[in-house]
Amino acid sequence: MQNVKLSIVIPVYNEINTILELVRQVQDEKHPKEIIIVDDNSQDGTRELLQQLRADNIKVLYNPVNRGKGYCLRQGFQQATGDIVIIQDADLEYYPDEYGILISKIVEGKADVVYGSRFLGAHRAFHFYHYVGNTVLNLIANIALNTNLTDLMTCYKAFRTPLIKSLVLKADRFGIEPEITAEIFKSGYKVYEVPISYNGRSYDEGKKIKWTDFFACLYWLFRSVFRGIDVGKDTLLRMTLMKNNNKWTYSKIQPYLGKKILELGSGIGTFSKFLVGRGREVTLTDINPEYVNHLQSRFTSNPAVKVLNADAQKINELVGEARFDTAVAINMLEHVENDGQLIGNLKKILLKNGRLIIIVPAHKWLYGMFDKNLKHYRRYEKEPLQDLLEREGFDVEKIEFMNALSALGWFFHFRVLGKKRIPASSAVIGDKLIPLIAFIERYIRFRFGLSLFCVARLKE
């Protein structure tokens, strides 16, 4: 923990009485850190004090007009270069010597985000109506997000830096608090709460949040809850809920798996969890740093799992001297512009008689707006895929369509209706039908399907 670099983001507005003491306390805290202060056009002399600060690890940004806490935080997040970002208010309500409590679960790999709860730890008795507002807002947020937070509006939040930078945040003022929370829970990150101390201020002492902000926070909470997330991430999250489909998929690839496995495009680990264990050494890869952080957190204590932030097109360069008996690409090859080059590069890192296991979306006639939004370059036909593999030096052991019934549903939703996302109801219904579909396709080989399943062995 002593080697973790922190990025402390401090929004400031008219805090002449506390800002210098706050900065001193933050500096005295034991971890390596950078301090990013964003002054929101203070008019009480705070700005002049900030201009006198002289330290290599302090960066001060000045807003030309007052924009609000949310705007300041967004500016600070963009500047962060540390391993973990912590939000710190400019008053003295929170204690910087408790940073270690905040970051411990992240450092241990147990959490992606940690909230410091004022209601679980020692705290100064403060305004009853603030407590009621917090309680009601927490209850609404917990219902909307299906969680059990005790302190949505706490200042003390700690994040893995790539995570907070990846969130799409819009709120300029106190609505940033529920907006951050909604975006985090929508994305499925692991969140912990820890008890912290709290010295709540009165309005005479400079407290700024007002009762009207309760309604603004409600607005930003529901705006975020109902705002769609990135379609790729949304699809990955929906896939994690399709347990029957995922088990069926694994049952098809399991007989062909070796002991040294490379998975390309692991995403958030939907299928990775099936690959690890059973005496296997597994290397997981993804080009998205956010997904890589998720994988590292998920498999942090498994010595047989290695996680790489890797462009699949350059995979042979990035794995070094490592060699594999199995390469797995599930719903990944369609994202690669030059799929032939990728397959050719895999030859260089597969052992003699090594296998390439591929599942790709099938049929050009199913290609629609959803594929475009997912950045699919193509959907595949059976014979061209087989020809491609054979040209690149592989013998095709098995190639077959799978999930024919879902192909019909896909055509209706994405070609006829022009849907841009997988409807939640369709995902649930489709997953319930998977055991029946798997049973039927055990005896009947259809000449079409939602996906193509292929196993190819490297020629000697």
Image (tube, rainbow, N blue to C red):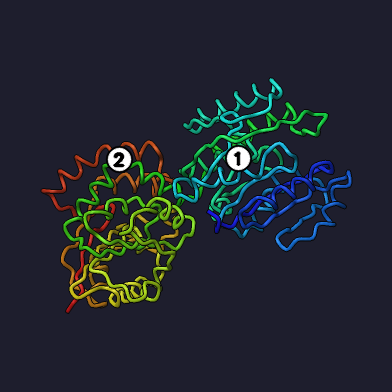
Instruction: Give the camera-side residue of 16 and 239.
Output: 16
Placement of the C terminus among the 4 image quadrants: bottom left
Total of numbered circles in the picture? Answer: 2
Point 53% across, 53% down: residue: 1
The label on residue 179 is: 1
Task: Give above or below for 177 relative to 279.
Answer: above
Q: Could you say where residue 82 lies in the image, as x and y percent from the top left? A: 60, 58
- Label 1: few (<14), some or many (≥20) within 10 Å? many
Report if the CB atoms under discs 2 and 1 are less than 8 Å apart.
no
Q: Could you say where residue 66 lies in the image, as x and y percent from the top left? A: 80, 45
- The reply, left or right, for residue 32 in relation to residue 323 is right
Task: Give above or below for 37 relative to 383.
Answer: above
Give, as a three-letter code, the residue at label 1.
Answer: Glu
- The reply, left or right, for residue 24 in relation to residue 442 is right
The label on residue 120 is: none
Q: Secondary structure at mark 2?
A: helix
Point 73% across, 58% down: residue: 58
Instruction: Give the camera-side residue of 438 and 88.
Output: 88
Point 65% across, 29% down: residue: 123
Label 2 sits on residue: 430
Q: Of label 2 and label 1, which has the lower sequence position? A: 1
User: Disc 2 or disc 1, which is closer to the eye?
Assistant: 1
Q: Secondary structure at mark 1?
A: helix
Task: Give above or below for 122 relative to 332.
Answer: above
Q: Could you say where residue 391 lies in the image, as x and y percent from the top left? A: 25, 77
Point 50% across, 48% down: residue: 106
